[in-house]
Amino acid sequence: MPAAHARKANYGIAVAVYDQGGQLLSFANHGASPASGEIAQWKGRSAAVYRHATRDTAAWNMAAAPMISTAEGGVPLFTREGASLGGVGVSGAPSSFDAECGTRAAEASGLRVSAP
């Protein structure tokens, strides 16, 4: 889903999905640069372990914290009931579009990107 949305907008993106412990579950690069692939992983892992969108963690002023991303485009994943599942990171497009892709994918899967 994120790749199709990005293709329609003429962006190449990379997508990384992590479990709640910060372990990489899935990674795909859909025409983004290798650097964007690394950034997608950084964003996804941050969202998974901190359980907050990277747009929010950027505002924490803790850039040196371990595994924290300060770039928008990572969103945490929660069940409808609020259990943490992990996070997804997207990179390759403008940061707000990256975050939109991750959010759309989560919602299409029946998941939330914030705790209830």
Image (cartoon, helix red, strand yellow):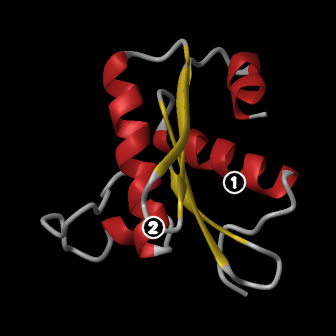
- In the image, 78: left or right of 34? right
Residue 69 horizontal/vertical position (percent)? 32, 57
Q: Residues within 10 Å of mark 2 (few under 14, many from 20)?
A: some
Residue occupying image coordinates x 81% and y 57%: 107
**Quadrant of the image occupied by residue 98:** top right
Residue 27 horizontal/vertical position (percent)? 53, 33
Q: Residue 21: give its label.
A: 2
Residue occupying image coordinates x 84% and y 53%: 109
Q: Measure the alpha-carbon separation of dots 1 and 2.
A: 20 Å
Can the viewer see residue 88? yes
Can the viewer see residue 72? no
Residue occupying image coordinates x 45% and y 67%: 21
* Above or below: residue 60 compared with residue 8: below
- In the image, 105: left or right of 58? right
Kind of residue indicated by mark 1? Thr
User: Circle 1 is placed at which residue position?
Assistant: 103
Q: Which circle, 1 or 2, is nearer the viewer?
A: 2
* Above or below: residue 97 compared with residue 28: below
Residue occupying image coordinates x 27% and y 61%: 67
Residue 48 horizontal/vertical position (percent)? 48, 64
